[in-house]
Amino acid sequence: MNSNANTIPVGILGASGYTGAELVRLLAHHPNADIQLVTADRRAGESVGNIFPHLAGVGLTTLTHIDDADFSDLDTVFLGLPHGTTQEVVAELPRHLRVIDLSADFRLADVGTYAAWYGHEHRAPKFQSEAVYAITELNRETIASARIIANPGCYPTASLIPLVPLIEAGLIAADDIIIDAKSGVSGAGRAEHEANLFAEVSEGIHAYGVGHHRHAPEIEQGLSKAAGREIIVNFTPHLVPMNRGILATIYVRLNEGNGVADLRAELGARYGSEPFVRVTPEGVAPATRHVRGSNHCLIGIYADRLPGRAILICVIDNLVKGAAGQAIQNFNLMSGLDETTALEQEPLFP
């Protein structure tokens, strides 16, 4: 599929999960990407259309077990493997491959921090130094020349895109940030878990990972880099009964002499020419339904009733801008292509 002299041969490892399916959906119509390999260990030998009927028409071959995969003719691999398994896979991949990892395995630059939060030692520390943490809008120059991309998590993407420019500009107090975030159920992956059953999720909302969610150090890593010192953030995620979406409500304290208009001006200037990030008009609250199925990121800015404080609201689709879409945006950047390639679709509504 998409095979011509100008295409880049790619593989998708872990194609039977939600992010793998999104990678197939988006790359199937990418004019410069030719999907030559799809793997899924438990579903090896099955067709993509059997696992995902909505993808039956994309023309892919059957899924291969990763141990039987041939990487010799590939240029880039996207890894949608479970957390904790990618490091060992990357260590064994041929060195000519460019790697875009959608798991958490290379997101934390400090291997000690990784071990503390993920419960085991980093299994490929020599490759961690090669990995580039890749929120596209915040790190273009390094991403373009990288071999290993650590694609960010969905919560960190929705948190860091609005916060980093404001911290870098000195407009808000980096030590006084509260992130109250909600996610759709697909953010938990496709594996069978009792907590994700319809009867456990429907008609309710609940917090999880309270005080110890693994995305906290990832968010803190980005905020600390922006501030030039260690930052600890108050972050609490919640699960809501919807399939897709991240909504982060972020409470910040303004530094003296700054107002909400300054936040709006800074984010407007920083992202005014971006194809996917947009500040909503004053008084317009972004909602997850405004970005569903797209690579868009919307940011709303409000004055708090408490003097000297402001509220930021950021929404993304966790499977697109929070995963597969951002991975393809990074692939485009690494390949010298227009960043919007294969990501031009507008959000689905309703």
Image (cartoon, grey):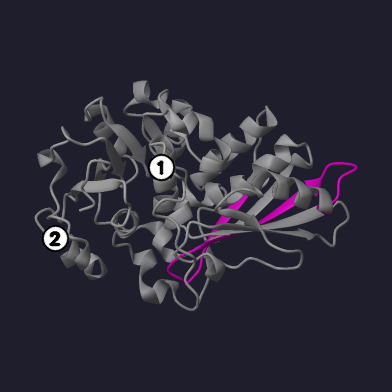
Q: Which mark is residue 332?
A: 1
Q: Which mark is residue 47?
A: 2
Mark yes or no: residue 113 visible: no
Q: Across the whole image, how many numbered discs are drawn on residues?
A: 2
**Badge 2 local density, few (<14 within 10 Å), some, or many (20+)?**
some
- Check the image and report above or below for 131 versus 333: above
Query: Residue 240: horizontal and vertical position, in percent?
Result: 50, 68
Question: Residue at position x 72%, y 42% from top?
Answer: 166
Q: What amino acid is at disc 1? A: Asn
Query: Residue 209: horizontal and vertical position, in percent?
Result: 50, 53
Which residue is situated farthest in the right direction here?
A: 257
- The segment highlighted magenta reads 235-260
Mark yes or no: residue 197 visible: yes
**Foreground pick, 251 / 275:** 275
Picture quadrant where residue 61 is located: bottom left
**Foreground pick, 3 / 179:** 3
Question: Residue at position x 63%, y 48% from top?
Answer: 273
Mark 2 → mark 1, Cα distance in angstroms: 27 Å
**Badge 1 local density, few (<14 within 10 Å), some, or many (20+)?**
many
Query: Residue 344: horizontal and vertical position, in percent?
Result: 45, 58
In magenta segment, residue 249: yes
Q: Is residue 27 left or right of residue 180?
A: left
